[in-house]
Amino acid sequence: MNRVCKTNLDMVCLNSIANDLALIGFCKNSKAYTYMCHAIFFAVQDSKNLSSISSKVFTKVAEFYNTKPANIEKACRHSLDAVYFDGNICKVNDVLGIKYLKPYEKPHLTTFISLLAEKHFIQLNKLILRREKQRKCFKRTLKVNVILNPSKIFLIKKASHELSL
């Protein structure tokens, strides 16, 4: 069985997707919940294919779980319908932070997945940029520590003193 999360950032992204789906009201015990988590995660990983979610993302999830893409799509659609008819679809706006869906509108499955995928794609890129900044700062501090080693400072002062004479 191949792993979905190859890095620590992938695990953070998958956990935040799972938390958002739980906040919206998806039942954590169903297979559709895990299918939906992985569908959104694969959409984030393959952000170029947000327009073709049903053809590419559902096939990846189906390959991962050794089932048919139609079964994945049907389970995800059923879980989205259950959330919608429970009246929890207004929480999607709160989770996304925008006013996209109206309370009486039922979103399409691909629209729902692409909205959450865009949100998590932006969050993932912010995390990547933050970690790159931390690495650069860490490398700079390593260079400064190497340069400011007390024995080397003495040698630098001695060499500069000899040059100035």
Image (tube, rainbow, N blue to C red):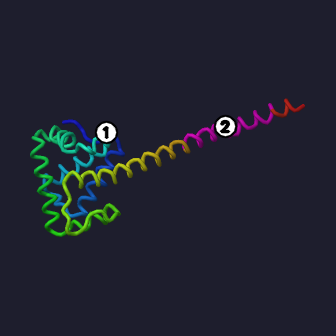
Name the residue: 18% across, 36% down: 1
Label 1 is placed on what type of residue?
Lys
The label on residue 37 is: none
Task: Tell me, yes or no, whether the highlighted magenta stretch contains residue 112.
Answer: no
Q: Which residues are magenta?
A: 138-159
Q: Confirm whether the magenta stretch covers residue 144.
A: yes
Residue 159 at what x, y percent from top left?
A: 80, 31
Callout 2 secondary element: helix
Q: Residue at x 67, y 37 (%)?
A: 147
Q: Position of residue 18 (x, y in %)?
A: 25, 55
Q: CA distance from mark 2 to mark 1?
A: 36 Å
Badge 1 element: loop
Q: Residue at x 11, y 52 (%)?
A: 75
- Give the residue type that dot 2 points to: Ile
Closer to the eye: label 2 or 1: 1
Task: Please tell me which residue lies in front, 76 or 135.
Answer: 76
Relative side of 37 to 125, left or right: left
Is 127 on the left-hand or right-hand side of 26? right
Percent position (x, y) of residue 99?
32, 65
Within-10-Å neighbours for mark 1: few <14, some 14–19, many 20+? few
Q: Pick the residue in front: 75 or 19.
A: 75
Find out whether the residues at labels 2 and 1 contact each other: C-beta distance under 8 Å. Answer: no
Per the image, the residue denoted by label 2 is: 147
Circle 2 residues within 10 Å: few <14, some 14–19, many ≥20? few
Residue of label 1: 6
Q: Quadrant of the C terminus?
A: top right
Q: Earlier in the sequence, mark 2 or mark 1?
A: 1
**Residue 9 percent coordinates (x, y):** 36, 46
- Where residue 158 sits, quadrant-wise, is top right
Q: At 59% from the left edge and 41% from the top edge, which residue is drawn?
A: 140
Kindly report the secondary structure that dominates the magenta region of the rendered protein: helix
